[in-house]
Amino acid sequence: MDNGSGSCLKCIDLTKIYGMGRTKTLAVDHVSLEIHNKEIVSIVGESGSGKTTLAKLLLGLTEPTEGEIYFLGKKRDISTHKKRLEYWKNIQAIFQDPYSSYNIFRKIDDVLLDCINMRDGKNISREEKVHMMSEACRFVNMKFEELTNKYPFELSGGQMQRLMIARVFLLKPKILIADEPTSMIDACSRATILDMLLKLNAEEGTTLIFITHDIGLAYYLSQTVYIMKKGRIVESGTAEEVILHPKEAYTKRLISDVPKIREEWDLSTVVYSTE
Amino acid sequence: MSKVLLEVNELSTKYVTRFHEDVYAVDRVSLKVEEGKSLGIAGESGCGKSTLALSMMGYYFPPLHYISGDIYLDGNNITKMDPDVIRRKILGTEISYIPQAAMNALNPTQKILSFIQDVIWAHNPKATKEEIFNLAKERFTLLGLPESVLYKYPVELSGGMKQRTVIAVSVILGPKVLIADEPSSALDVTSQKMVIKMLVDLMESGFIKGMVFITHELPLLYNVTDDIMVMYAGQIVEKGTADEVVLDPLHPYSRGLMGSLIVPEEGMREQKLVAIPGAPPNLKDPPSGCRFAARCKYVIPQCTKMHTIEMQELGNGREYRCIFSEEELRKAYQNG
């Protein structure tokens, strides 16, 4: 899916092995993929399929055992702290648990101010900063005036996740990795958050990488879908191809396991696992 | 009409906070579970689904307090019973509950078998170890769980397995009604299907006679239960069969919920997700009139002027809580 724009993030034979000796676990197994600018990509898999490890590798939170990552056509270099910070200006993440994503001792103003300062905002006047922050809050349908002097834990889960998106709006990264951003949130607030992420893609041109086990969500949001099984990518293609016309048996099973409305959900084929 | 197993009549309960404030979490809820039927309860976080589940068992412990209403279990009114009697004679044997964090319900320092022994001894102190072992083994085989699980600690089991073990343990005393509160919300789709299959099997084989299934995932409810109730701010806002509520919702709130569904089906991508704006009201001081009024598109001044809005019956158990008539609502939906 090339929208006439170049490669944004590319990895070749990315491998991550946790532990050593008898406890050696192959979490990510020779994964190669290419994500283009402004693309919306979903990486789908069961629990333990290695999707979060892949996200951490792309974010530079863990070092790959093998393989290379290319960012904007150049080999990624995060060998020093300074280079790593520079890389993180371009790639940001939203995690599953909004409660553990914030520093509980810092107020919301500080959280947002940090983002402005990180984006070379040291010389901006206080008024300008406040204006930027209220604009970011407006982007996620919140009011900055109501948030000042509050701590993140005073908000609900959905609001905290929206504040995360406001942070991303201020930072304007090239890529946003969203690791199960809505799995702890009920269906109603989920729609709001997904719409905001799509708006971020449409208005700011942010490349979105969704990590999820929710196939419906992957189908609704993404242009390209990758299916992961035991650390490997077993199927990839456009959302229509992969989810409506899956080829791999594993993908077919995964999709048949999701309860649907118009199609029948067949429970008779379920085999109880013994693990 | 078949026998009514569980009947809840105008039940209201509240939480009393540390600051002695009352939070009216369940407000005059009535429901019926017939023999061989399952009832689903849907609603967003904080609408009182789980509190209703706890209240339905007739066993109250602070901060949850009973206000009014009746619960009939198999024809017996259990609201007036002594809590201690309820604990020994009703819970587990007549009505059983799978809590939301069921995975944490197991004791990490006990093997599953010894946990089952404790459960059974609490109700029947005379049971011998051999009897318990045979019963547990028989049930586990029947429910597709390997016998080896009995000798394991909870940490040795996967999430899906733990959940299935908890279900097997909660039905070991042969309850008539099972209340499942979000039994699959922390599992991936494959384990979720196994858990659901187990519950459906329990119903079909007649092990449990009725089930109340609570979740915020509507596609799941639609596939599992016969009837669905939609709850909002402590009240039931719509009741009907699964087909009626999911495919043809009447109440503006239920309609809003359906707008936020995501299923991997053709045409889903073209559809736009519609979120309901705003947040539910604070139940410390519930607004008068319609509780959904502040978030409703179709609100008129009368909605909040009345003290309470009563359920309108359409026959066949279909009810909804709105001041508009069925025709008026349908017309409003047609015009967008």
Image (spheres, grey):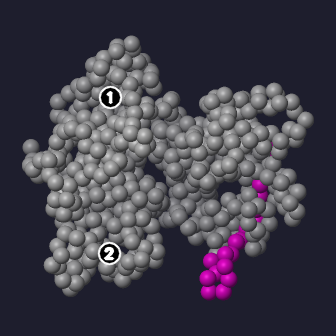
Q: Position of residue B288 (x, y in %)?
A: 35, 22
Whether residue B56 is situated above or below residue A149 in the rendered picture:
below
Asked if residue A13 can be seen in this view, the reply is: no
Q: Amino acid at mark 1?
A: Leu
Residue A128 seen in render:
yes
The chain that hosts pointer 2 is B
Is residue B193 depicted above or below B298 in this figure?
below
> Residue drawn at (83%, 58%), measured in percent from left and top?
A84
* Residue B14 lies in the magenta-colored region: no
Label 1 marks which chain's residue? B
Q: Residue at x 46, y 77 (%)?
A: B156
For the residues labelled 2 and 1, the Cα–Cα distance comes to: 46 Å
Q: Is residue B331 left or right of residue A53?
A: left
Amino acid under label 2? Phe
Q: Is residue B173 above or below residue A206?
A: below
**Most foreground residue, B299 or B129:** B129
What label does residue B250 carry, if any? 1
**Residue bearing mark 2:** B115
Coordinates of residue A92 in the picture (x, y in percent)? 73, 50
Point 57% across, 40% down: residue: A155
**Could you tell me which residue is drawn at 64 percent across and 71 percent down?**
A27
The total of numbered circles placed on residues is 2
Circle 1 SS class: loop
- Give the x, y percent position of residue A71: 82, 55
Left or right of B129? Residue B269 is right
Q: Which residues are magenta?
A: A4-25
Q: Is residue A23 left or right of residue B196?
A: right
